[in-house]
Structures are given as C-alpha cells and as structure tokens.
Amino acid sequence: MNNLRIPNQRAILDRRKLVAQIAALGPDTGNAADVRPHVVEVLKVALEQGRAELERRLADKPSAGHEITGGYAFLVDQLVRVIHDHVTAQVYPAGNRSAGERLSIMAVGGYGRAEMAPHSDVDIAFITPTRKAPWCEQVIEAMLYLFWDLGLQVGHSSRSVDDTVRMAKEDLTIRTALLEGRYIWGDQQLYDEISRRFQSEVVHGSRQQFTTEKLAERDARHQRMGDSRYVVEPNVKDGKGGLRDLHTLYWIGKYTHGVKSAAELVDVGLFTRAEYRSFRRAERFMLAVRSHLHTITGRAEDRLTFDLQRQVAEAMNFADRPGKSAVERFMQFYFLQARRVGSLTGVFLAHIEDEFAAAKQRRGILAAFDPKPRDLQGYKVLAGRISAPSDDWFRQDPVRLVEIFQLAEEHALEIHPATMRQADRDSGLILKDVQEDERANALFLKLLTGRNNPESVLRWMNEAGVFGRFVPDFGKVNAQMQFDMYHHYTVDEHTIRAIGLLSRIERGELEDDHPRATREIHRVASRRAAYVAVLLHDIAKGRGGDHSELGAEVAHELCPRFGLDAGETALVSWLVKQHLLMSHTAFKRDLTDPATIENYVGEVQSMERLRQLAILTAVDIRAVGPGVWNSWKGQLLGELFDASQERLRLGHKRHGRAQKVTAKRDAVRASLGDKVAVLETHKAEFPDAYFIAEPEDIIALNIVQYDAARRLDHELSVHCEYYEARGATLVTVIAADHPGLFFRIAGGIHLAGANIIDARIHTTRSGFAVDNFLIQDPHGRPFREAAQLERIKRSIADALASRVELIPKLAARPLTHSRSKAFDVQPRVIIDNDASGRFTVIEVNARDRAALLNRLARALFEAGLMVHSAHITHYGERAVDVFYVTDLTNGKVTAPDKLQAIETALVECASDEWQEEMENA
C-alpha cells in the first residue's frame, strides 16, 4: 500500500545467508527428499528469529504499526523467494521449460498491501500462462508443503491469466484481492501481463459498480459488528471505524483513480494533506494495536476484548492519570482514531459521489441543465444538503459553526461533507468568546431541543469536533469509555443516544415501552431542562470522585450560559446529582415497604422533579446498550413513580395498613371467580404483611396453589409460569418452613441455569413457607418452554432433598460473564437500619457469579438472620444483592458487634478468594 522502507532488514532475515545455508545441505539434484527435513529446520529457525526480532522492535516502538506490519510482510517475502528458488533449482529443476511452464507469485489481500500482523494469513496467488502446466503444479505443491511445514496459514489460489481475469469480473472478493496484488517473485512478465489485463478488462467501465458493491459490503459488515464505532469491545479489523474501513477507502480510491499508494489520494484530490496525515496516524495506531493483539494471544485475534484491553494498554505504554486508568486512556485514544476514520470516510465518499454525479450529468440529456441551490440564511441548499457558500465562511463569523448544525436540524437537512471538512478544519476558531456568545448558545439550545432529529445532527457536530469545542466539558468525555461490562458505548455516544431517545419519546414513538415517560414529557414545566439534564447527566465522568456531584457543579456553570433561568438551572443541577436515585431505589429497595416511598419522596419533593427524573432515568438506562432496558425494569420504575405520585399529590398515603389489606383481599376475591372459596378458607393463615407485599395477581395464584398443596398433603409444591407483566418467570415454592430454606431454593434455581432478580419470602401462621421468585436466564430473558420449567422444578426439589451438593456444584459453574475476571470488583457491604421501618437492609456489591446469591443467603442463615425479601440487580460483571432481614425475634439487627460480624462474613463469601477455594476443593 505504501513504499515503506523497513530499517535494518537483514536483522529480520538475511536472504543471501539463508540461501547459502540451504545450498550447503546437499547437491543441487538427486536427494531432495533426504535434504527436505533439514531445509525445513533451517527455514523454521530463520522464521522464528525474524519473528523474535520483530517482537523486540514492537516492544521498543509499541506504536510503530506500519514498520512492524511491513516487517512481517518483508519476512514472508524473503521466505517465499528462498523457497521458490530452492524448489525450482533443487527439487524440480527444469532445464528446457516450455512457454507454458512459467510461474509468477503475487501477494494479495493484506499481504499484498505489505501489512501483516504477526499471525495474519499469507494470501498468495500463483499465476501461470495456461491451465495445464505440470511443472508449475509440481512447484506450487512443493512450495505449499514447505509453507505448511513452517506453520504458516496460507490462503492460496492457482490460476491461469485468463481464468484470473474471468473470475475477477464475476467475484468482488477476488477483484478486491487482485486490486492489491504485489509482485513477489518468479516471472515478472507474467505479473505485468495480468496487471495490464486487470486494468483494461476488469476495472475499465466498472468503477461505479465496484464502489457501490464495496459500500454495500461495508454496510453489511458494520451491521454484523454492531453498527457503531463506539462499542466497548471493538473489532480492530472489521469493526466500524476500524482498519477495514480505511482499506475500503484505499480500494475505492485505487479502483476509481488508479492510485498506487494512499499518499496519492492527496494528488487526485480525495484528501487534503492534513487529512492524509490523520489517515496515516489512525492506520499506524490500529495496525500497532492489531500487532499487539496477535503477539499477546499468539493467534490471529482482532477483537479488543476487556481482558486484552489492559494488556495492550500496558504494552503501548499508556499510564494511569487522576480519575482515568491507563486502559480507559488507551481506549479513549482508540475511539478518537475510529471517529477520525468515520469523518475521513464521509469526506472521501462525498468526493466520489460528486464525481460520479458530475460524470452522469455530462453524459445525460440534462447535460446543459445546471441546478441552482436555494438560499437559507446565507447558506446554500441543494439536493437536501446545506453547505457553506465560501471557504472563509466560518472564519468570517465562528458562531456559524453552531448555526449550520442548528439549521440542519430545524430544516431536516444533511450537511455537505465538504462543509463538514471546513467545520472540522475551522473548529479551533471556537474560543471563549464564541462559547459565551449569547446567540451561539441560543442556537445550541435550539438544536439540542430540536423537534426533528437532534441525535444525528449532534453526532455530526461531535464528529466535526465542534461539539467538544463549544462545550469543553463534553469534549472531555469525547470517546471516553467506561471500563466495565455494563456500558456498551463511550460516554459521548451514550449521551447522544439518550438525547435521541428523549426526542423519540416526545414524538410518541416509544409509547409501548415508556408509557409514563411519553405522557409526562408533555406535562413537565420545562422541556429545555429535560434535554439539558440528559446532555449533562454523565458530563463529569473520568474526573475522579462522584461524577453525579461533580456534574451538578458543571450544570450550575453551564445552564445559565445556555440561557436557562435560575429555576431551570437548579432543577437540572438536582437531576444531574440525583440521576441514579430512581433506578437505585426501584431496583435495590422493596417498593412495598412504606419507608422506601417516604425516603424517595422526601428527596424528590415535587411532581416536576418526579416527572423529570422518571424521564431521565428511562432514557439513561435504555441508552446504555441493546437489551439493557426490559419490561421488568419498566414495571419497577412504574410502580415507584405511581406510589410516589400518590404520596406527593395527597400529602399522605391514600389508605392505612388495614384499609390496604382489605382492598387487596377484595381485589383478589374479584379475580378468583369461581375459586373464591379458597381465599375464604385460607386468608386467616396469611399475615397482613403478605397482602401488602404481593400484587393481587400473584396472591390469587399463591392461594390456589396453597389450597391444592394442603388438600393433597404435598410436602413440596413448586409452580413455574411465564409472567408477562414482569418480563420474567414466576416461581412459587410452598413447603414446611425451616431454617436455610431460602438459600437451598436459591441454589436449586441457580443450578437450573437461572438468575433470581426478585424474591419475597413469607411464612403462614400454620408454619408453611410461601416464597415467590422472579427469574430470568443469564441474558435477561424469561423461561417459557415446558422443558425449562420442568428442569427448574426438578432442580429445586433436588436441592431441598439434599440430592445434590450445592456448594461444589455451584462453584463449578462458569462465571456469568466469562471475561469478568478482567475487572477489579472489590466486594462491598452496606448495612442500613434507616431504609426500612421493620427491617435491616443489607446491600452486597460483588462480582457476579452463579453461586453468589446462594452463598450470601447461606451466610445470612448462619448469622441467625431471617430473609424477608431479596432484590437482585446486575450491572455487567457486577451484581448488587439487597436483603431485607430481621433477627430471629423479628426485630432489626442493631448490635455493633453483630453488624460487624455480618459484614465480615458477607465480604468473605463474596470475594474471589472464596470462589477459587470452592473451585479447587
């Protein structure tokens, strides 16, 4: 791809020396088979020494991507030449070869570009004049066997010139591979012939077709890889913004303009010199990352998984900084390069598109017609694109760098890539005077709260570098990843997606998933505050300290600048500070406990805050990544919203405890229909706390199951069914209550491959446990199939009958997330006696694993505590398990020594050391 000079080539492989070593092994003819093992050994030593030299160079110059990948291509080049000469001179010498017995060896694909990572495939095309060439076939076969003996992964083809040209016309992959063909050795005239015919017979007349097919191929690849350049485990080669996107630009440039190297893209006007330099920087960095991935793993690994990110960051000499770890700094730099690739792609393809359009117009019946752009506040608008009227447009008034994006959003226009290039070039004009300019801020706020598509336009603004310049605090989180398995995107991409979700909710497009947010967005006092809160909720990540607290301070500074009044500023600052409050309350607390609602309402204090926080919480969770939002989370947040709304509107709870129990029983009675007698039979056995804690539909199911279990005198009754309202599976276990029942049931459920997300534990006055569990599979989906439900029942029965040894079997199960060991998750226990009026609330944060809930529940049992409800939340590799407990006298746990002992026991059993001990037991 580029004529890169590899320094000190002979230190990698000295071909003359290697040829001499092979020649010394035996005479030219007569005993090639006897000599062959010795030849292979000499070649292996040369290959291993060459690789060792390149690994040393990579360690010394960890960012020298071009030099290292070029070095590996040089190493293979020399081996191919030596092997070819050995085979043609010593294995199959031919004194008088015919005109058809000629062979040319061509490197294709990445090898053709002279860009090879340590374990890249060696892609070779053997070219012959005709199909039937026995001597050529013998030579090719002998060479391939030597390649394979060396352990090289060879992708090869053997074709005549005619066949190669014909197949290139028919197959895009072959055409692309040949496009990067590079002569290595053999018959030079044969290589020249195929190069000439490829240009005249394949490329000529098919430039637009090739471009269209290549872009369609790129789009399909992006779709497979997640269609975002900001996924937190990117594929360096095939992911969006990765090496393959750079290759696509080069392929199209070479095919349409005949360039021989990327540098020539400047000469033909597809890149400016500055853009070419950034092209090379991005390519150099990504080639280096790919080389490190191959070196660390010892295989052709192109995905930057969490466990490898730390190692590559260390190998490339990234260091920790205050508030940001080395791996986060490395990944931020990676995403900045990926973003640069995206902006280069836009500029490049716009040029190609304009060239094709101009050529088509010159040939068409409208050749004399020159469409005139319309004027929009001084800008030119043509074919749905807005563009700057002159090269110095932004220099004349830098506020226009914000204005053009606002106009694009308001009028549903795209920005012409040439103008995007101008904006990128001139973004440095946005200094303090522009940041504080009243008109500029009014335009920005109008864009942010736009009614069409603020998400896409803000993303363009970000990729042009204007967003981060105008809002420097946003620039600090640009391309910043969060090193965990919960967040799927970088902070800036997550924020822009959340703004887009808010816009879609306001337009009513997500009503099925977010009915309350869709309703309440039209009731808030300030929609401007809603959008600004979403923009700023994660603005202070990566600074060290609590990003919510720090973000609230940023909001106090930025909101007045954007034009928000004092009331809106106070509201946004509060929302940023408390943006996790609603989700933490809904997912980690018992919503049937009156203290939960009282504490939450005490913090929220007003309907405006309640509405705004509910909307912010919904878009924040959903923008984390695909599948993070589900109906279970929606249900919990809805219950918290409804209970808080009632409390705020009335100033008190609508019903007292006795009234609630009566109302619940009446509702259950109505739902039971002809089975209503079972409620009258057994209602006295269930305490009031049961009727308050459980929803009426579950009570109806429990009562019917309880009645059947008692009539049939079953010692154990397990009922499982898909519970659509919660997006989970309901498992109800009825059995004679005894100490340790909960942790044994939990163990049985986990052994069946399920995760418990919520649990309520009840004991009837006659001594029976009625325990309700909501479960999902490890991917957050419910169990529905009959065989799955039967497996859960059987597993619970086996655990309660002690037919399985729970601890070793659970410890042997793999981690819920196989790569979670890449993260440092220190167990943390919080014990709170103020969160509930009746219970001590214990929260355990730890690495997620199959045995965790069972082990924690067992530790609580051994500590003499009774679990009344459990609430389990997962954040990627981290689990948060919350228990509402009492001591054996049904009172709170208050003794300091007892609390310390509980904390110590829970930390111990939540630690990685305990897991390792159990696995090795």
Image (spheres, rainbow, N blue to C red):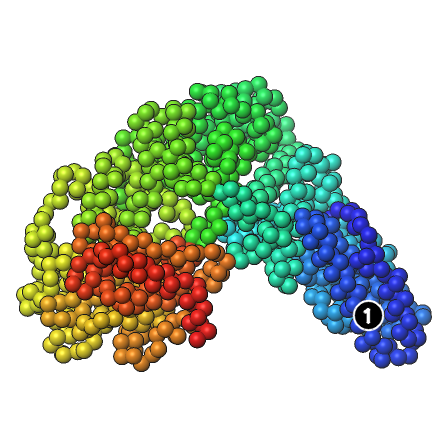
445 sits left or right of 419 in the view: left
Which residue corresponds to the image point at 69% horizontal and 66% vertical from the top-left?
153
57 sits left or right of 626 in the view: right
In the rendered image, residue 647, in percent from the top left (x then y), is placed at 17, 42
In the rendered image, residue 821, in percent from the top left (x then y), is placed at 48, 60
Quadrant occupied by the C terminus? bottom left
Which residue corresponds to the image point at 21% horizontal and 51% vertical from the top-left?
836
Q: Is residue 720 above or below residue 472?
A: below
| Residue 479 visible somewhere in the drawing | yes
Which residue corresponds to the image point at 56% horizontal and 54% vertical from the top-left?
310
In the rendered image, residue 639, in percent from the top left (x then y), is placed at 23, 49
How many numbered marks have been drawn onto this rendered protein structure? 1
For mark 1, what is the residue? 42
In the rendered image, residue 266, in percent from the top left (x then y), is placed at 71, 36
Quarter-wise, where is residue 553 in the image? top left
Quarter-wise, where is residue 760 in the image? bottom left
Looking at the rendered structure, the secondary structure element under dot 1 is: helix
Q: Is residue 478 above or below residue 161?
A: above
Tell me if mark 1 has few (under 14), some (14-19) or many (20+) residues whose alpha carbon lies within 10 angstroms of its own: some
Q: Is residue 11 above or below residue 277?
A: below
